[in-house]
Structure formats: C-alpha cells, structure tokens
Image: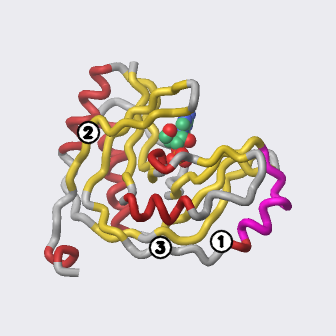
Amino acid sequence: MIRLFVALQLPEEHRLLLLRLQGGLPNVRWVPEENLHLTLRFVGDVDKHVATDLDEELAAIDSDAFALRLRGVGHFDRRGAARALWAGIETSPELSTLQSRIEKAAVRAGLEPERRKFHPHVTLARLKGFPLDRLAGYMNDYAGFSAPPFTVSSFALMSSRLHKDGSIYTPEAEYELRQNLHLAYA
Ligand code: 3AM
C-alpha cells in the first residue's frame, strides 16, 4: 500500500513568503517549508495497481498552465476550535477546472468520489483544538496577506510516509500542463 495525494507544489519563493506567516501562536505544529503544498485530491492508502491506474489517468489530463495567487488566511474548525490554519487561494476558474478533471480521473481509476467541497488552501499549521477567540489577533494581523501570482505549470502525485518527526512528502510523478503563449509572454 502507498499513501497518496495529488497536489500543486509551490515555488520556493512562495514557500518562503508563507514561512513569514508562521509564528506568534503557542502550541502549534507549523508545517515545514518543504511540505507546504496545495492539495487537489486526497487519495489515501491504495494498492500499487490503483496507483498505476491513477497515474495513467492523471497523465491523460490535458490542461493549460495558469496563474494563481495566494491570498488571505483562514482556519478549519471542529467542535468550535481551530484544527488547521491555512493561507487562502484567490478564486480561480482554471484551478477549479483542473481539480474537477483530477476528480474525474480519480473516479475513473476506481476511487470513491470525494463528497467534500473543494476548498483550495495551503495548510500552514495543525492545531490541537485552538480556541477561536485566541486566533482573532493572528487572523487580523494577516488578513491582508497576498503574494505575487505564480504560474502553475504542473501538478504532482505525491506520496506521504509517516516518520517519527512528521510526514515526508515525495513527488512520485509530475504532470506538465500545456504552456500557452499568453503566460509565456506575460
Ligand atoms: O493539504 P492539507 O495539508 O490540508 O490533511 C492532509 C493534507 O491536507 C490531507 O491530505 C493532505 C496530504 O496529506 N488528508 C490526510 N488524511 C486525510 C483524510 N483521511 C486527508 N484528507 C482527507 N481525508
């Protein structure tokens, strides 16, 4: 079995910008720089043959490269407390289209459809039920966060292996998007 997810990797420059958002909160597990990514589809533990089918379906996706921008911060909550802190992504029809193509590819490869709505984000930290009122200052400080746009020219099938110091993410396959003239000359 191999634990997989499909993600966008971020340019180093943008990962470094995100590091600046990591601080000022106690008892928080900040995501290490090399693990910052945007999940497009969580896959979970699958057999080798499912991984191979998924790889073939993902490789058949034919989409154009596009520009994307990080903007704002937010949190996912459970039972009235924050569990994850994230940087947001500016609304992007191209990202939604790519995500829905990946979802269809995953289902064609035999995976159960994802029932949850896609909420693009880059997880900055995992929290053990952080009280929401104590997050207000942080949210206020970084509400205006934005970074220059970057070009999404590929997406990746990533594996996740748990080590004692945390998860190790490895790109198992990378799928190039079609370069278009508009972006090439931007
Ligand atoms: O991109 P983020 O960090 O939000 O939380 C996990 C991470 O998402 C998520 O998959 C990404 C890569 O590990 N993840 C882990 N287990 C999951 C599960 N059982 C999950 N997403 C949905 N269901």
Q: Which residue is mark 2?
A: 173
Most foreground residue, 157 or 28: 28
Give the left or right position of residue 138, taking residue 131 as reference: left
Crowding at mark 2 (Cα within 10 Å: few <14, some 14-19, many 20+):
some
Residue 147: numbered disc: 3
Q: Residue at x 32, y 39 (%)?
A: 171
Residue 142: numbered disc: 1
| Residue 182 point in image, percent of width and height | 19, 78
| Residue 57 point in image, percent of width and height | 23, 39
Give the left or right position of residue 105, taking residue 133 as reference: left
Identify residue type, mark 2. Answer: Ala
Crowding at mark 3 (Cα within 10 Å: few <14, some 14-19, many 20+):
some
Q: Residue at x 57, y 25 (%)?
A: 164
From this view, report whether residue 47 is shown above or below residue 142: above
Callout 3 secondary element: loop
In 3D space, how far apart are the residues under numbered discs 2 and 1 (Cα atoms)?
Answer: 34 Å
Q: Residue at x 39, y 18 (%)?
A: 1
Check if mark 2's residue and mark 1's residue have beta carbons within 8 Å: no
In 3D space, how far apart are the residues under numbered discs 2 and 3 (Cα atoms)?
Answer: 27 Å
